[in-house]
Image: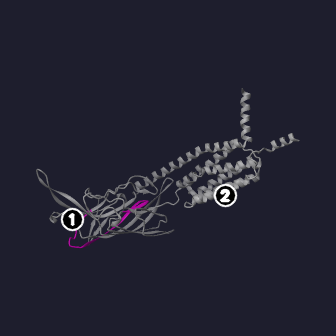
Amino acid sequence: MEQKQESTFEKVNNAIKNSISVKLLSIGFLIAILLIPQSMIKSLITERQSNQFVAVNEVSDSWAAPLELTGPILTIPFEVTLKDKEKTYRTKRYAHFLPEELIIDGDLKPETRKRGIYEVIVYSTSLSVTGKFSKIDLSQFTDQPDHILWQEATLSIGIPDMRGIQSDVKFHLKDTSYRMEPGIPDFIQLDLDQNDLKYGTESIRETRNQTGVNTRVKLDLKSKETAFAVDLDIRGTKTLMFNPVGKTTKVKIQSSWPHPSFAGQFLPDTHEISDSGFTATWSVFDLNRNYPQQWLGKSHSISNADFGVNLYQPVDNYQQNTRSAKYAVLILFLTFLSFFFIEVLNKKKIHPVQYILVGLTLTIFYTLLLSLSELIGFSGAYWVASSLIIAMLTAYSLSILKSKKLAGFMLLFFSLIYSFIFVILRMEDFSLLVGSFGLLIVLGFCMFLSRKVDWYNIKSSKERLENNQIHA
């Protein structure tokens, strides 16, 4: 029984060693097996990316959430008389008015904060908000002017995270200055009806604009228009957004950050981006949004009309690592194919265990790349990791192939393949095109190498010698 097992093992071993079909099947099986650790690496990248999002959230909790500015909004209450079966009573209604013109001029100053090994982009900004209200007319809401409570007129500005305010907020209405108080009264509707604010490409948490500042104001009822101005020193995390509450809203933002990503419902009318920063301007009109200039109570909410800028980090290590891991199958396939052609064309014998060791070395590249990229950035990590892997595989090729020429060929092959993958990763817009032509060239080279191979009569040198002796 023991002898039979040895005989079967020898048959399988000889089949793998001498049969091209069995060799190809075994290589395909090994590639499939090695895809298991590749999927585990992708899960590891996702986990590390989640840790980065947690770090961003922690920094924003200590600094301030993304900023979305809404306002100013003028709210004027008036009394109405209601009757029921038993009595007559008065209750308040609230009319909301938006500015005729809103102009915002801001200087955004970015900073980089660290939480462990993770970098988070935060900012401080100085916003100059000016504009004017047209003459307030409540005739569409009430026909009893004496019931209008002008003394309770309230101005409010929506700010998602009050921790971001860095100085007193003084609201100048015509010739009078008012210090704004924290909070927004319940009768003022500032529900943005939005799902979240974005930290880059991923959403961390839902952020509702239900907080802000307000003040009672005294209106000049004879004036046709009332000018206002307020300066805001405020900070936030990564994203700065605005709601176009003016009949005409004009926003200009300048910053030293060289990588802006314009977000929201409206793109800038003009923008200039350079290595020293960016400048962008927006113009939005009341016809571009889904709420009017004035409304009663909670019949409308300010929603789906925000715009602004996100301080984008162009080198996202985890996104680049994910893209790199997608080419794992390609590298495995090309590497095994190269060793296979060496076996066929140079009559070398490579054991499946040696294929496995080569495949595991290629797999370790991605964990090495991920860990190094968190410390020195993706580009530097890629070249360090690829250099180490290329050196290991070249040395191993020399030991198993017993040929400096073939080891040099493998050195050139691995250098080309890793350089080619890096170029594809950097060329985001044309990566598919370049990758397709690259694969076409590789396939053509394989066809060139195999053009004179007699696949039905591939024998080792020992077998050919034995056959020649028999025929002799």
Q: Check whether the beta carbons of the residues at disc 1 and disc 2 lie within 8 A of each other.
A: no
Q: Which residue is mark 1?
A: 140
Q: Residue furthest right?
A: 472
Q: Position of residue 50 (x, y in %)?
A: 48, 50
| Residue in the foreground of this view, choosing between 464 and 452 | 452
- Dot 2 falls on a residue whose secondary structure is helix
Q: Which residue is mark 2?
A: 441
User: Colour scheme of this structure image?
Assistant: one colour
Q: Quadrant of the N terminus?
A: top right
Q: Position of residue 168 (x, y in %)?
A: 32, 64
In which quadrant of the rendered view does residue 40 lie? top right
**What's under tag 2, amino acid-wise?**
Ile
**Count of numbered marks:** 2
Q: Is residue 377 left or right of residue 250?
A: right
Q: State which tag comes first along the sequence, 1 or 2.
A: 1
Answer yes or no: is residue 396 visible: no
- Dot 1 falls on a residue whose secondary structure is loop
| Residue in the foreground of this view, choosing between 125 and 369 | 369
In which quadrant of the rendered view does residue 197 lie? bottom left
Q: Position of residue 471 (x, y in %)?
A: 86, 41
**What's under tag 1, amino acid-wise?**
Gln
The rendered magenta stretch, by its main secondary structure, is classed as strand
| Residue in the foreground of this view, choosing between 424 and 398 | 424
| Residue in the foreground of this view, choosing between 470 and 265 | 470
Q: What is the CA distance from the residue labelled 1 to the residue labelled 2?
A: 74 Å
Q: Position of residue 347 (x, y in %)?
A: 77, 47
Q: Quadrant of the C terminus?
A: top right
The residue that appears at 30% across and 66% down in the rendered structure is 170
> Which residues are drawn in magenta?
215-242
Answer yes or no: is residue 39 visible: yes
